[in-house]
Amino acid sequence: TIYEIWNGPLLRQARAVHRQHQGVQTYTACAQCFLPRASQAVRATVNGRVLEIALDAAWSRVAVRATADRLEALDAATRAIAGVLDLDRVLQLIVDSARDLLGARYAALGIVGERGVIERFITGGVTAEERAAIGAPPRGRGLLGLIIREARSLRVADVSSHPDSFGFPPGHPVMRSLLGVPVFVKGRAIGRF
């Protein structure tokens, strides 16, 4: 604010200049001391506010562009999925689209059966060789089991330090974080990302 600028370095300057003028009661009454400093304060405040508004506008444009990019990607994914009739291909498109939209290295979709165990496991970001090295797909223990049992989203920054972590099998790619989300169809959880 002008008050903050005026009462800081500009006030000290005005007092120093004013000391040179004898016979004037106060420095604020001295046009030679007060007006140039007040003018500086106003310019500094206006320029600072203009800069603040310009930066806010720039950040807003970046946020809008990022949102538009995500919406375009979601639209493209939806159109691609709608054009495919094969269930396996649709599920793979869903996994790959989710991975792209989130900017994740890996993604997976576990389809849970009636007994609460993962019956199908579709992956993205893992090569066929890596998938073969991992071995059997998960059944739903550890953090995946927690998502299955509680049917709620789970975000974990460090998988290995979570109390429900079950660990990874040999050959599994290194993964530190996890975002797990239940997938509902007609109110019933059928899968987990």
Image (tube, rainbow, N blue to C red):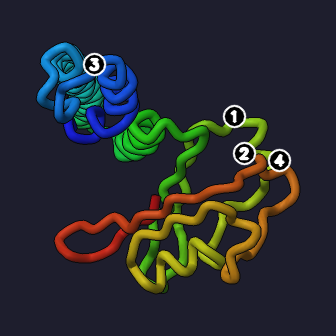
Give the quadrant of residue 183: bottom left
Q: Position of residue 23 (x, y in %)?
A: 20, 25
Closer to the camera in the image, 191 or 44: 44
* Dot 1 and dot 4 residues touching (CB under 8 Å): no
Under mark 1, the amino acid is Thr
Name the residue tied to disc 3. Answer: 21
| Label 2 residue SS | helix
Left or right, 170 with respect to 78, comes to right
* Dot 1 and dot 2 residues touching (CB under 8 Å): yes
Residues packed near mark 3 inside 10 Å, few (<14), some (14 to 19) or many (20 plus) = some
Comes first in the chain, label 1 or label 3: 3
Spatial separation of the CA atoms under disc 2 and disc 4: 5 Å
Comes first in the chain, label 1 or label 4: 1
Residues packed near mark 1 inside 10 Å, few (<14), some (14 to 19) or many (20 plus) = few
| Label 4 residue SS | helix
Closer to the camera in the image, 77 or 34: 34
Spatial separation of the CA atoms under disc 3 and disc 2: 85 Å
Name the residue tied to disc 4. Answer: 133
Under mark 3, the amino acid is His
Nearer the observer: mark 4 or 3; the answer is 3
| Label 3 residue SS | loop
Asked whether the viewer can see residue 178, the reply is yes
* Mark sitting on residue 131: 2
Q: Position of residue 49 (x, y in %)?
A: 20, 26
